[in-house]
């Protein structure tokens, strides 16, 4: 379906527009100071300076005449008959940073955009509704997707061309950004009917894909068995996980396998989960010095991570490790959960409650060159650094256990910064180290603890990765559930306090007193954007877990109230299932019902699991009725690809039991 461009150069005609004028008086004092400092460097802010999104603010001094998503940009495109260049990403996205440096900070490429396009920047984490629509279009046009997402739209917001990262110039047969913009301008002005035909074709596809025709289909335990067979077939018996590189943790899969084990007693489901959890915790995907899990592993052995850290990964993995601990009573799973929560407490917790979104993958090489950044540099070590920092025997023990080699241990070096460096992973067990160095296991544990603390002290002096400090309701719901479950499983009152403080904070800051509606995002005193299905569902999920952990009625009352609101705003009474949005935003081309459980679970899967749990707690038939109707709506998809919706299978299992 891709729009086939014949890339050719045409010259820029007419004067280029400069970024929109910024009124300093409307900015807060901190932002005014930043603007004044940047102006000394010859940089002028664009409209994004008024936004709270860390991602949009990262682009506020680009020479591109950026607009946030909204009617001002769309009206300009209509009046001037220009295509819209839509750029979607998030503040901790490595390739988003690369494209900004190479493309959006280029005066010449910005001039092309300002002359020929209306440029719109979207933070996908603030606006998952916008991201979802255009990712669906991008995948249809190109067969794949990712971020940064780069699309060209007609003034009526229909996409006709899509890509992810676009290099500034032609590379390896791929056209460069300038070539694409020039060629699009040529086709836009000379063959507008071709562009409109392509845009209409994509829009029609989105209509069909977002509202598929389904026949209500009852499903039972057979789809659970089919999903288990899929996981068993795709299981990596050597390193854990499913499939080959890159490997994502995808906690929803492990949730399903643990539920399947509890229902059937099939030991293989438990074993696959436990091996995967152990291998992830041993690998470089786990931060052995500072705790917390990185985003995913670029290799099959969990050794070389993509280094960003996301709140939703920490939350979901804590829950899975806690479940493994409760089933096995093995302390190592509880230890991982505790360590991840220690990382969240230290790095991602707002002082008043709530949790920040993410930590970047890249950081500066040194403080003297803050703009020279690369992925992972904060986390890498040379053998010489470790030998200089630790006593000889401690250095030898540390190197043995954590796979430190003289010439570096990275299996891959995608950015040419890993040469001679080491990514820490557990190459040998404490038992093996005790035998090798003639120590007790307890002595080895003590040596390694002191060594990690010493490395952490040094690492804290390095330039730190950027933190995205916005607070998202959906991800915070998952984190509240993690803390509540940690309190229930481990009995530490601090976990209960963190969960309750955060739940109260979110209810107060993201609840609209006038309408009763929830907002999605909070940052620097501003609550903004109407909450979507995933916000309601994930937050209710956290409130239910908090009620189960504390037995305090107020949390159940909030869960019941918000579920009623969620049903009123999102439920499809005709067919079942929940829409992702309310349908009130006219700028969205379609109203979808997402069901795929990926790195984050879908709003529908969590919503149906909530209904099942509320039915168990209250006995109210309305919850079961709507859950059953929804499962029937998704029934055909569950039969075709059950492994795509593992958390919905957990909901199905609870309802059928």
Image (cartoon, helix red, strand yellow):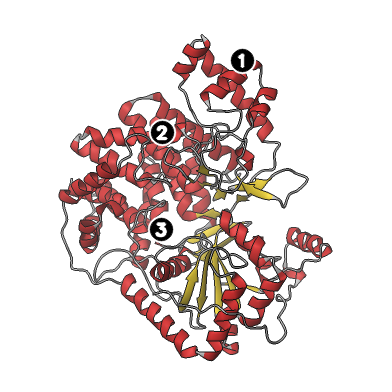
Counting from the top left corner in percent of width and height, residue 466 is at: 63, 49
- Quarter containing the C terminus: top left
Q: Residue at x 23, y 51 (%)?
A: 652
Tag 1: Cα neighbours inside 10 Å, few (<14), some, or many (≥20)? few
Q: Nearer the viewer, residue 521 or 567?
A: 521
The residue positioned farthest toward the front in the image shown: 173
From the image, tell me which residue sits under label 1.
393
Tag 2: Cα neighbours inside 10 Å, few (<14), some, or many (≥20)? many
What is the C-alpha distance between the residues marked 2 and 1? 27 Å
Side (left or right) of 155 relative to 230: right
Tag 3: Cα neighbours inside 10 Å, few (<14), some, or many (≥20)? many
Q: Is residue 574 above or below residue 318?
A: below
Earlier-in-chain disc, 3 versus 1: 1
- Label 2–label 3 contact, CB within 8 A: no
Earlier-in-chain disc, 2 versus 3: 2
Local secondary structure at mark 1: helix
Residue 534 shows which numbered tag? Answer: 3
Q: Is residue 517 above or below residue 304?
A: below
Residue 279 shows which numbered tag? Answer: 2
Counting from the top left corner in percent of width and height, residue 90 is at: 55, 58
- Can residue 18 be spotted in the picture? yes
What is the C-alpha distance between the residues marked 2 and 3? 30 Å
What is the C-alpha distance between the residues marked 3 and 1? 51 Å
Side (left or right) of 266 relative to 171: left
């Amino acid at each position: 379906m891709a729009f086939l461009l014949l890339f050719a150069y045409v010259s820029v005609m007419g004067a280029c527009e400069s970024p929109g004028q910024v009124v300093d008086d409307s900015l807060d004092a901190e932002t005014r100071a930043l603007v004044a400092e940047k102006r000394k460097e010859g940089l002028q802010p664009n409209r994004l300076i008024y936004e709270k999104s860390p991602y949009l603010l990262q682009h506020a001094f680009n020479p591109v005449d950026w607009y946030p998503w909204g009617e001002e940009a769309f009206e300009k495109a209509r009046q001037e008959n220009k295509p819209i260049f839509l750029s979607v990403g998030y503040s901790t996205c490595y390739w988003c940073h690369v494209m900004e440096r190479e493309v959006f900070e280029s005066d010449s490429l910005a001039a092309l955009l300002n002359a020929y396009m209306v440029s719109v920047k979207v933070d996908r984490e603030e606006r998952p509704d916008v991201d979802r629509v255009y990712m669906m279009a991008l995948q249809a046009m190109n067969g794949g997707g990712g971020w940064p997402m780069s699309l060209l739209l007609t003034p009526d917001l229909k996409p006709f061309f899509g890509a992810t990262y676009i290099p500034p110039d032609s590379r390896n047969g791929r056209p460069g950004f300038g070539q694409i913009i020039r060629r699009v301008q040529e086709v836009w002005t000379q063959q507008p009917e071709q562009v409109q035909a392509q845009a209409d074709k994509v829009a029609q596809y989105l209509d069909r894909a977002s509202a598929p025709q389904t026949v209500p289909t009852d499903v039972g335990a057979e789809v659970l068995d089919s999903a288990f067979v899929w996981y068993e077939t795709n299981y990596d018996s050597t390193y854990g996980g499913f499939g080959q590189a890159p490997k994502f943790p995808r906690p929803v899969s492990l949730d399903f396998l643990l539920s399947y084990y509890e229902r059937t007693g099939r030991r293989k489901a438990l074993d696959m989960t436990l091996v995967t959890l152990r291998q992830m915790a041993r690998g470089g995907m786990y931060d052995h010095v500072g705790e917390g899990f990185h985003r995913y592993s670029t290799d099959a052995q969990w050794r070389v991570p993509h280094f960003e850290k996301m709140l939703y990964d920490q939350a979901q993995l804590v829950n899975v490790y806690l479940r493994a601990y409760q089933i096995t009573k093995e302390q190592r799973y509880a230890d991982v959960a505790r360590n991840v929560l220690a990382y969240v407490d230290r790095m991602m917790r707002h002082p008043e409650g709530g949790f920040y979104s993410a930590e970047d993958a890249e950081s500066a090489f040194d403080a003297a060159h803050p703009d020279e950044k690369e992925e992972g540099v904060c986390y890498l070590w040379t053998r010489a650094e470790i030998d200089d920092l630790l006593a000889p025997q401690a250095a030898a023990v540390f190197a043995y256990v954590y796979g430190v080699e003289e010439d570096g241990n990275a299996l891959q070096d995608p950015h040419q910064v890993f040469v001679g460096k080491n990514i820490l992973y557990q190459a040998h067990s404490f038992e093996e180290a005790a035998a090798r160095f003639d120590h007790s296991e307890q002595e080895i544990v003590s040596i390694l603890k002191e060594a990690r603390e010493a490395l952490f002290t040094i690492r804290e002096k390095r330039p730190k990765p950027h933190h995205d400090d916005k607070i998202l309701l959906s991800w915070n719901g998952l984190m509240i559930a993690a803390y509540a479950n940690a309190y229930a499983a481990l009995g530490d009152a601090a976990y209960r306090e963190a969960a309750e403080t955060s739940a109260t904070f979110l209810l107060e800051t993201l609840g609209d007193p006038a309408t009763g509606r929830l907002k999605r995002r909070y940052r620097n005193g501003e609550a903004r954007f109407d909450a979507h299905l995933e916000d309601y569902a994930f937050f209710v999920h956290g409130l239910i877990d908090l009620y189960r952990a504390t037995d305090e009625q107020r949390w159940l009352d909030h869960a019941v109230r918000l579920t009623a609101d969620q049903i009123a705003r999102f439920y499809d009474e005709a067919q079942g299932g929940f829409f992702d949005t309310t349908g009130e935003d006219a700028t969205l081309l379609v109203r979808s019902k997402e069901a795929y459980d990926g790195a984050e679970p879908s709003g529908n899967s969590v919503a149906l699991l909530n209904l099942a749990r509320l039915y168990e707690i209250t006995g109210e038939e309305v919850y079961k009725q709507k859950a059953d109707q929804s499962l029937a709506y998704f029934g055909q998809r569950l039969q075709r690809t059950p492994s795509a919706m593992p958390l919905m299978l957990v909901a199905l299992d609870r309802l059928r039991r």
